[in-house]
Amino acid sequence: MATPIRRYEGRGLTGEQLLTLPAVVDLDTANRALMLGRSTGYALAKRGTYPVRVLRLGNAYRVVTAELLRLLGVGPQAPDGVGCESAEAGVLPRSGTGS
């Protein structure tokens, strides 16, 4: 069983923790995965320059985990140890990119 993610428990997330994240995470979790400070992450989100798409839901920011994993180069491993490309199959392109 995966180790639960505890807030403020060191910086960064392990590969195992990243792979157990839900489909969408809060901005604090995404900041931790990217090793960004809280103030920096929120400032980037507010300016629209966060490294991945940020969803604004009321007063809350959310980040699509598939995009976060793609940016970090993390994906499920096939039995032969090669990353599984099918994990990205259902990801929609970022809005405003013209794709």
Image (spheres, rainbow, N blue to C red):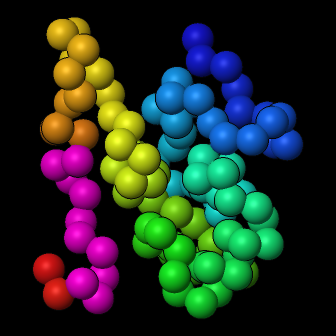
The residue shown at (63%, 36%) is: 13
Was residue 90 drawn as part of the magenta stretch in this picture?
yes
- The overriding secondary structure of the stretch rendered in magenta is loop
Q: Pinpoint residue 62: horizontal percent, then vertical percent.
A: 58, 66
Q: Is residue 60 magenta?
A: no
Q: Is 69 situated left or right of 99 in this image?
A: right
* Lateral position of residue 48 relative to residue 67, left or right: right
Question: Is residue 8 visible to us here?
Answer: yes
Q: Is residue 93 above or below residue 80?
A: below
Residue 36 image-quadrant placement: bottom right
Between 42 and 4, the one nearer to me in the picture: 42
Q: Is residue 72 left or right of residue 31?
A: left
Where residue 68 sits, quadrant-wise, is: bottom left
Residue 60 visible in the displayed image:
no
> Looking at the image, is 17 positioned above or below residue 45?
above
In the image, which residues are magenta?
Answer: 88-97
Q: Residue at x 76, y 61 (%)?
A: 37
Q: Which quarter of the rendered picture does the C terminus lie within?
A: bottom left
Q: Residue furthest right?
A: 8
Please tell me which residue is depicted at 81% across the width and 36% down the height of the picture.
Answer: 10
Above/below status of 62 relative to 85: below
